[in-house]
Amino acid sequence: MKQSTIQSRTYDKLREKIIKMELKPGQKIIISELMETLGVGRTPLRESLKQLQRQNLIYTIPQSGTFISKIDMVQAMQSRFVRECIEKEIMVELSAKYTEKNINDLKKILNKQKSEFEQKDISKYHDLDSLFHETCYIIVNKGKIWSWINTYNTHLDRFRWLHLESETFDYNLILKEHEALLEAVIEKNIDEVSYLTINHIRFMLKEQGHILNAHPDYFTEESIKMVNSSLE
């Protein structure tokens, strides 16, 4: 396997561990432990950590070590705003361009998501949530835009994971919203598509105070101040 491929896969695995809280905000990184866990050498691991540091997902304190960054709700809210603006247009375009095969592919994803919910596999359920949205972008030839959003979306994704664990997984909200959105797409109901897309992405506005209160150590001080101020 080429070194660049090893590094890329190492980065993807590390990013997933950060999003799914296997590496928790504020946790110190132990290089030797990660090398053993991921089954990689020091060079691809260090290059991956540099990439994560450029995205403000890890930070280094001299004489102390390297740590997982806490969740920055300012960045998360900005990511949500960008995604909301773009995705509304993506879903409207999908309504005009979809084929029967496209709809069948999206329904297969939702069927798998339902199955993972029944199996109580929150990790696979989360991944299928992302796959549903990515597939919509790909159908309208905007896959690179999804890749760009995904690169800078990690603070939002970590909040989404906490929200999924504590709020939405129990009553399968994400799948229900996906199903309603897809139905509106099939019916070419543009107003409903726009409304449902925005409502789906704005979920984080509804429970951010509750999530921060449940996990205060996972968030930056600025995040806590911002959310508390918005709730006053």
Image (tube, rainbow, N blue to C red):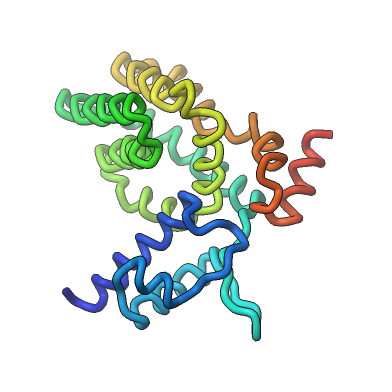
Location of residue 87 in the rendering, given as x and y in whole percent from the top left corner:
43, 37
Q: In the image, 2: left or right of 78?
A: left
Outermost residue to the right: 232
Counting every numbered tag in the picture gives 0
Please name the residue shown 33% across and 67% down the image: 38
Residue 120 appearing in the image: yes
Location of residue 126 in the rendering, given as x and y in whole percent from the top left corner:
39, 39
Q: In the image, 195: left or right of 121?
A: right
Please name the residue shown 35% across and 71% down the image: 36
Please name the residue shown 55% across and 68% down the image: 58
Is residue 144 placed above or below 127 in the rendered structure?
below
Question: Which one is in front, 88 or 29?
Answer: 29
> From the image, which quarter does the N terminus lie in?
bottom left
Is residue 55 placed above or below 130 in the rendered structure?
below
Is residue 187 placed above or below 56 in the rendered structure?
above
Please name the residue shown 38% across and 75% down the image: 45
Which picture quadrant has residue 206?
Answer: top right
Question: Which one is in front, 93 or 40?
Answer: 40
Question: Which one is in front, 83 or 163?
Answer: 163
> From the image, which quarter does the C terminus lie in?
top right
Residue 153 appearing in the image: no
Location of residue 145 in the rendering, given as x and y in whole percent from the top left corner:
37, 50
Q: In the image, 11: left or right of 24?
A: left
Location of residue 89 in the rendering, given as x and y in whole percent from the top left corner:
42, 35
Which picture quadrant has residue 208?
Answer: top right
